[in-house]
Amino acid sequence: MKIVIGQINPTVGDLKGNVEKIIKIINKAKELSSDLIIFPELSLIGYPPRDLIYNLELADSIKKILKNYIAPLSYDLGIILGCPLYNDTNIYNSALFFYNGTLFFRQDKTLLPSYDVFDETRYFKPATDISPITFKNKRLGITICEDIWNDKDYWNRKIYEVDPIEKLVSQGVDVIINISASPYHYGKISLRTDMLSFIAKKYKKKVIYVNQVGGNDDLIFDGTSLVIDENGYIVWKGKSFEEDFGFIDLLDVQKDEVLESITEDISSVYKALILGIKDYFNKTGFKRALVALSGGIDSSVVACLAVSALGKENVLGISMPSRYSSKESVIDAKDLARNLGIEFRVIPIEKIFSSFIEILNPNGEPLIDMAEENLQARIRGNIIMFISNREGYLVLSTGNKSELAMGYCTLYGDMTGGLSVIGDIPKTLVYELARFINREREIIPERVFKKPPSAELRPNQKDEDSLPPYHILDPIIKAYIEDNLSIDKIVGLGFRRDLVEDIVKRIDSAEYKRRQSPLVLKVTTKAFGIGRRMPIAWKRNW
Amino acid sequence: MKIVIGQINPTVGDLKGNVEKIIKIINKAKELSSDLIIFPELSLIGYPPRDLIYNLELADSIKKILKNYIAPLSYDLGIILGCPLYNDTNIYNSALFFYNGTLFFRQDKTLLPSYDVFDETRYFKPATDISPITFKNKRLGITICEDIWNDKDYWNRKIYEVDPIEKLVSQGVDVIINISASPYHYGKISLRTDMLSFIAKKYKKKVIYVNQVGGNDDLIFDGTSLVIDENGYIVWKGKSFEEDFGFIDLLDVQKDEVLESITEDISSVYKALILGIKDYFNKTGFKRALVALSGGIDSSVVACLAVSALGKENVLGISMPSRYSSKESVIDAKDLARNLGIEFRVIPIEKIFSSFIEILNPNGEPLIDMAEENLQARIRGNIIMFISNREGYLVLSTGNKSELAMGYCTLYGDMTGGLSVIGDIPKTLVYELARFINREREIIPERVFKKPPSAELRPNQKDEDSLPPYHILDPIIKAYIEDNLSIDKIVGLGFRRDLVEDIVKRIDSAEYKRRQSPLVLKVTTKAFGIGRRMPIAWKRNW
């Protein structure tokens, strides 16, 4: 059986664009005399559609597209397409199997994730039944994303009672198919590959895994679709962070084609962020990015990522020194811009700052307090938004996860922007990314790595005046945010109790800032955004 | 049977504070020799706890509080308390019934809402069973919030298969009890009362409805607990938008005590917003509010609400005229401040605006484009945040729902603030609120009602240059946002197609602004915020 894997990058809501893409690949599959083509979860409308799924015009259009465009293409080719199925007042997250010009089979998703960024029980009803379908003498077990993530032998936790894979295999299947929209986080590609390989081995079944690729808002989908043989070896692997087209003859899977297992490193995070930027721009219609360059490591990394995503001709760097900025900061920003080959402007904020201070301060002189620190950041926010509004740039905000966690950032100041590129990257990982960027030649000036991080909002300010050293702070943030550990447990990892308590308190009380943050590209198991829903007006008093 | 209703206002996470409140009322109930006391849904931790419910320290503390404080108080008094129940890896939204010093009975919530602002399937497992409990010779049917909202005869839709009330009644009950945390929207009090009365009549059973009161972030809970007799008449009604203590002898319910049914008017919205402001301040620890007064109707209404919520001594009004502001605007702002008795400052932004323009514009003169319009709004944003940071005020943002829908607002400018007070109030309703505020004497200057709305960001600007008239715009926004109607259906209501299409397009494309909005107090069936989860980078192309 010849199978084509359509690892596509759909845009949410863009039915016409997505179906065009789908048809193009179907036609290619036909040229290759394929038997079956498989597309990712909800690929006709893009995942996650969120509340857009309730749009009744969209629902109507889906039905028409399936009838007029997809079904007629299925006369000599089986087509498995991820698509919402509207049924009376219910919606199902379905794998629709078209063949011979009609809907030949339908499998709804059984396990609907409702944690972290997922809200599927909000939208969908679960499948009432799961069973294999015989197609060209093969019994195919079709599942959708989460359905394959509940193996009791692989995990030491079991989120759901039912294991759809177990149910399918018990009914007899030749191949397990899974269509997915599985968002990336650092380590997810290795984890997923390992798990799928485990399942293939456990049941002695081939596994065909078809994953969405692309950035949709805060979520980045890595693709990396897989075909795994009965022994758990990878026989085909789709590209990561790119669209791909796979063509496999299931009978022809040879051991000597087996690919190495996947280990993941910082390059995945780098590619993920680039895809996240690229697609946010593509899908919102923006072309050009503006990055405020402070001469520090965060904005340097964001500028490099922006150039990789959009091209140097589409990135503008702006240095906005104040009276407290060191000369080196402007030089470092300028050197970075030169190394990247991007347009660079210097707009000193001193005169504007003075005009505020003259009006707002009693004797017209700075008092050097937090109000003035934030004011400087906000003047910069105004300037970049002014240029954004006038010249059509989209502002990339440059704050990292450590800052966002601690509230060490200024609302409407450095938090300004349409997209927070590294808001899910802890400061220590920002340095790793920077080293990776400089792996071949010095793009980020070496001095930027060496100087102590500073907001430069008052004389001789250093981050470490206000924050613990990042190599101590970051593991505590991870323990609290990603691993949901109690204060006791975090202390048990070897940190001072007063420090842990202070950090937790500061994280809790900065929630109001994060609520007004731009979208944060998610690359860890728990990012700030829709995957972490914390109240603002609450008290830790227990 | 003597029953006490504890209509309390808990703070999320504040276990110690909430249990203190609960114990105080229990002791009062004991003084009255009550048989049973009933508290609202999740009242020990406050509703909605959101992801805070995953905090394991909090879970431990709940268990201890129940064992050490609540159970021991139940020797001569039945106590029904809404509380999360942690069981292995599952959490239930439970009504815990303590009696004789122990957990006498427990009823978990059956129907878990997962739409609009609700995420209960994210957190809770549903009840596996529902059955009445006999207490002092009465059979009590205990339900939790949503459990009572699925009567097939009352609604023409049925969200869930099961009707817990039907199941309970079929097993024989004397009284139906419902503990709730039912968020307010305009019309909800009438609707809820009507529905509960219908259910009481239908089954010929008394209904005791105990609702949370208070503001928790964007959600406002109105209280308005109810005791309804078998004929559907209200025999006791808790206060709306205030804590209350009810004491009813179930045997002693007489027809001549019956209260009138409830009709709701604009005064409910007014009270809801005041409670929302008051509790946001109380629960975040802020005391004083800052309102930018433009001399327009929106900021006037917000200032009035703030004064009612916080007291005139805690509200600061700031007028920030630009070169395009009319003299009348400053006078109107000043008159309002005088009428309210609040502190008032005038800070002209001309010099600051000029200092930006000198640096950012080619010849240092204004070009009068959108970048400059937004810049003025953002300079104002900077000034109020400066005062907020320096003097400890919390900024109330003043944009209305019509503006927020259309994106007719400036990110980091007029959208600045910790709380959006009228972000769920369409402009036409803002005028109604203003009239209500002026019902006894002129607080908002009459001229503010009469002048055409204007952002005053360029010469002779009027809202109607950029927006359709509000009496046409607002119903279209409602049809699209609240009623989820298709463009065809909205046109069918009698609006021009090109107008509807343009409005829908503008609403869709302003999502990125709303994502960075402060929390919006919800008072309609669909507010901008967590109850409406729309993607940003998507295309309407179907």
Image (spheres, coloured by chain):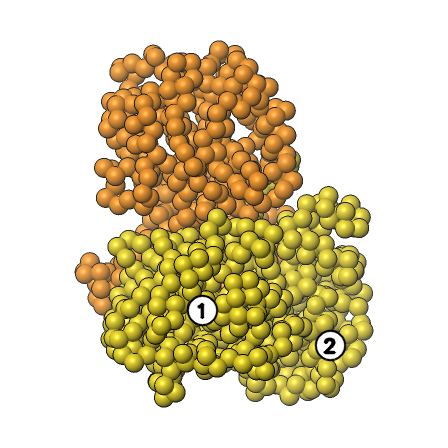
Chain colours: A yellow, B orange
Of residues B370 and A33, the one nearer the viewer is A33
Q: Which residue is mark 1?
A: A175
Where is A307 relative to A473, above or below?
below
Q: Secondary structure at mark 1?
A: strand
- The chain holding disc 2 is A
Q: Quadrant of residue B20?
A: top right
- Residue count near mark 2 (Cα–Cα under 10 Å), binned few <14, some 14–19, many ≥20: some
Name the spot of residue A119 as percent of width and height, x first: 45, 55
Q: Quadrant of residue A172?
A: bottom left
What type is the residue that disc 2 sits on? Arg
Where is B134 relative to B91, above or below?
above
Residue at 32%, 45% (x, y): give it: B159
Residue at 33%, 64% (x, y): give it: A106
Q: Do the residues indicated by labels 1 and 2 lie within the same chain of the protein?
A: yes
Of residues B112 and B6, the one nearer the viewer is B112
- Quadrant of the frame with the N terminus of chain B: top left
Q: Secondary structure at mark 2?
A: helix
- Residue count near mark 1 (Cα–Cα under 10 Å), binned few <14, some 14–19, many ≥20: many
Q: Which residue is mark 2?
A: A435
Residue at 45%, 69% (x, y): give it: A175
